[in-house]
Image (cartoon, rainbow, N blue to C red):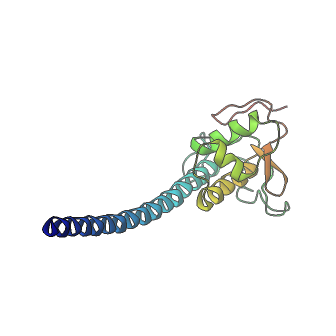
Amino acid sequence: MTSLLTKLERAEESARQECAELSGQMQELQERLARAERRLERLSIAREELTALEAADEPADAEPGKPAEGDQDAGRSGQGTGGRAEVPQERPVLRGLRKDAVVLLASSDKPLRARDVVRALGQQDVRGQVEGMRTRLKRLVDDGWLAEREQGLFTIASGVNGFAGEGGAATS
């Protein structure tokens, strides 16, 4: 009987060691996944920002590299407004999370915080996601889609009475 108990103890110890090894591998994979998700978030934000900057720099009817007529003041839209750009005549095209956030806030009956928007859009409620959303929401304020009624409370901008995802929302 002793030999069976000894074999069982060895098997149990072997299984315990395998569990510890797998647990360590799993923790390492979770850390790698978290790093990859943070990098993906930063790259996504950078792409959105570059796309918005590129769209703002070159109007559709202008030749690349040349400012459109009457655009001598381009690039100075934020002067005299405390760093915030004035509401543009034509709002930039919305895609992805920016579009989802505007649709959400247009349908909301109250202002929302970045964390509320992240949760409502089904994203992970983690600091990186919330800060990324806050950056998007502030950019949407600059673009004229949203308004920040109080610090951190976002709502649809006055004058946007209908949502058009291609940048041409009806204004009153």
Vertical comparison of 172 with 64: above or below: above
| 110 relative to 14 in the view: left or right | right
Residue furthest front in the image: 1
Q: Position of residue 85 (x, y in %)?
A: 78, 55
Tell me the residue at 79%/44% (across/down).
155
Q: In terms of depth relative to the viewer, which is nearer, 144 or 150?
A: 150
Q: Quadrant of the N terminus?
A: bottom left
Question: Viewer-proximal residue, 118 or 19?
Answer: 19
Q: Residue visible at 40% across and 66% down? A: 27
Left or right: 43, with 49 as reference point: left
Instruction: State the quadrant of the C terminus.
Output: top right
- Residue 42 point in image, percent of width and height: 53, 60
**Residue nearest the observer in this picture, 47 or 63:** 47
Residue located at (58% from left, 48% from top): 123
Residue at x-position 26% and y-position 64%: 15
Q: Nearer the viewer, residue 65 or 157?
A: 157
* Residue 168 higher or lower than 143, as above or below: above
Is residue 68 visible from the viewing direction of this image? no
- Residue 105 seen anywhere in this rendered image of the structure: yes
Task: Say above or below: 80 vs 123.
Answer: below
Coordinates of residue 99 in the picture (x, y in percent)? 63, 40
